[in-house]
Image: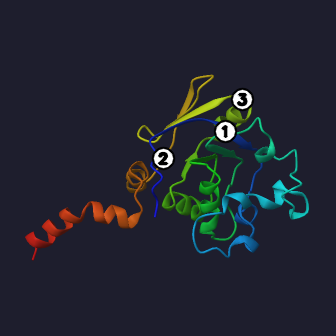
Amino acid sequence: MSKNKINIIHSTFVPLNIENVDTDQIIPARFLKGTTRDGFGKNLFRDWRYENDDEATPKKDFPLNQPQYNGTILVAGKNFGCGSSREHAAWAILDAGFSAVVSSFFADIFKNNALNNGVLPVTVSEKFLEEIFSQGNEATLTISLPEQSITIDATGIKERFDINSYKKECLINGYDDIDYLLNIKEDIINYETQHA
């Protein structure tokens, strides 16, 4: 059940300038045993983050291990979330503290899993993505879900992004599909009464 409300996200970002990141890299299969959404964030990009799967030995060159990179926005290369369908990938990203992922292309299944679990996938042009990656480590982005826009704050460069109107409403209100139906329960009852 999504309770992560998203309206405007203003944050620094973590750059992951790697293309074709698949769901097995986002959350390796050996960590899929959990039945709740909690605890997956510590294993986000596990094989890229640690030497020999040892948390005591983080790889210093990986962005999530570098203290200069932080924030609630993950910026990734083209074709993020490809590979097998794995809802746990969205769980891991959310549990690691990210509210949005920015890329120039998302695999459809990952994009839908993200939207269903309270993570906003923001699709931008390749040129805009390159502009984000060229920013310094203290640069901030502003993502406005109501306006469907993303802005590089230092330059003022802005792009609009597309999102399904139903999913947009769900993210703004922190609804999952059940919450949405419960929210319109009276409308459903009235409709059924009028069309009995």
Q: Position of residue 17 (x, y in %)?
A: 76, 44
Q: Nearer the viewer, residue 95 or 76?
A: 95
Is 170 placed left or right of 135 in the picture? Answer: left
Q: Which quadrant holds residue 188?
A: bottom left
Label 1's element?
strand
Closer mark to the observer between disc 2 and disc 1: 1
Q: CA distance from mark 2 to mark 1?
A: 21 Å
Which residue is label 1 attached to? 13
Q: Secondary structure at mark 3?
A: loop
**Residue 47 placed where, x, y %?**
82, 61
Tag of residue 152: none
Q: Quick one: label 2, few (<14), some, or many (20+) residues within 10 Å?
A: few
Which residue matches tag 2? 162
Disc 1 residue crowd, few under 14, some 14–19, many 20+, Cα 10 Å? many
Amino acid at the residue labelled 1: Phe
State the residue at coordinates (13%, 66%).
Answer: 190
Identified by mark 2, the residue type is: Asp
Compared to residue 151, the image places residue 109 above or below, namely: below
Residue carrying label 3: 135
Mark 2 or mark 1, earlier in chain: 1
